[in-house]
Amino acid sequence: MGVIQAPKRINNDGIDDQSANTAIGRIADSLNTFIQEVYNTCDGDLTVRNNLDMDFSTITVKVNASGVPLQKTQIKAKTSRTSGIICIRPLQGIPTSNPLFVFTEADGIITINNIIGLTVGVEYKLVLLIIGQ
């Protein structure tokens, strides 16, 4: 992966005309602030929670033979309308496959109705990536 170089600052050095100097100084301040923010973002400040319509959530769940959670399993949505849910890490229990989540969403609450890929009666603690639109 390439390394981005720190930006050079735009300034009004060498502008003799006072009104032009002032105008260029104001424009340079705005541009320098924006360019620095873009640089900081590209240089490590880009995160899922702050910059992408995604969030993480951890649930504890057991399912019956049909894959229906034994207890109502809900998550407060922190994204726009939810497109999907991906299990990114099991903390407890080992799924037999990557779980598939069937869910509904209403009033900012995601309700998990069915999970395919979990063993019946085994308690799982799963870290999920909630993907918004």
Image (cartoon, grey):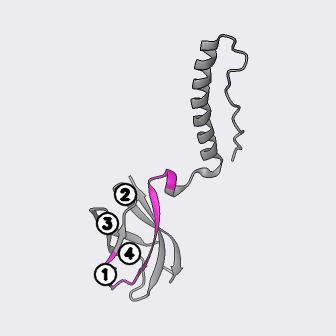
Residue beneath disc 2? 83
Q: Secondary structure at mark 3?
A: strand
Q: Which residues are magenta?
A: 50-73
Q: Quadrant of residue 103?
A: bottom left
- Residue in the image at 47% along x and 80% along y: 125
Q: What is the secondary structure assignment of the residue under circle 1? A: loop
**Comes first in the chain, label 4 or label 3:** 3
Q: Is residue 57 magenta?
A: yes
Gap between marks 1 and 3, in whole Å? Answer: 23 Å
Q: Measured from the top left, where is residue 67 in percent x and y?
A: 34, 79
Give the numbered dot on residue 116: 4
Q: Which residue is mark 1?
A: 66
Could you tell me residue 90's position as x and y percent? 52, 76
Q: Residue at x 70, y 44 (%)?
A: 2
Q: Earlier in the sequence, mark 1 or mark 2?
A: 1
User: Is residue 77 depicted above or below 14 in this figure?
Assistant: below
In the figure, 67 relative to 81: above or below?
A: below
Residue type at tag 3: Ile
Q: Residues within 10 Å of mark 1 (few under 14, many from 20)?
A: few
**Which tag, 1 or 3, sits closer to the chain's start?**
1
